[in-house]
Amino acid sequence: MNRPFVTVDLGLASFLYALGHKIEVTDLGRDRRQFEFSPEAERDVDGYFKGQSIPARPFFSAIRDVKALVKRPAARSTNPNSEPTHAHPTAKR
């Protein structure tokens, strides 16, 4: 079984979310959060670090959405087997 892609980088998490990847946010304590994505999200990570262009509006919307998830007190998930779900509005379903 493939392991999920995990990061603590808000910018990277927002980038992946803007590309349509579902996100799970886990509270690590001490005001730190972990962002977990399906293993398939890892294929888009290089694009982030190589400066891949994506439309500004979806990216900034994703930043706002991910920050809102971070501010919620409990762990959040886009896993279809848990509630609530969080998928970017333009996510491929």
Image (cartoon, helix red, strand yellow):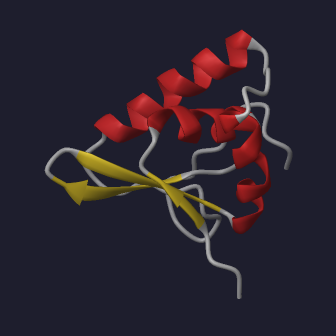
Residue drawn at (73%, 33%) of the image? 50
Q: Nearer the viewer, residue 62 or 85?
A: 62
The number of discs equals 0
Residue at x-position 52% and y-position 60% = 6
Residue 21: x and y, percent?
A: 71, 48
Quadrant for residue 26, please give it. bottom left
Query: Can you name the residue that lies furthest to the bottom here?
Result: 1
Q: Which residue is most to the left?
A: 30
Q: Is residue 53 visible?
A: yes
- Residue at the spot x=68%, y=64% of the render? 38
Q: Is residue 88 visible?
A: no
Left or right, 71 with reference to 63: left
In-image side of 60 versus 44 (left or right): left
Tell me if residue 40 comes above or below residue 11 in the rendering: below
Relative to 4, is 51 on the left or the right? right
Percent of width and height locating residue 7? 49, 53
In the picture, residue 2 is in which quadrant? bottom right
Q: Residue at x 67, y 41 (%)?
A: 16
Name the foreground residue: 86 vs 8.
8
Q: Is residue 19 above or below residue 78?
A: above
**How far across and how far down the image is residue 92, in percent?**
85, 44
Residue extending farthest to the right is 92
**Residue 1 horizontal/vertical position (percent):** 71, 88
Is 14 situated above or below 22? above
Q: Is residue 32 above or below residue 17?
A: below
Kindly give the residue lying farthest to the front in the view shown.
50
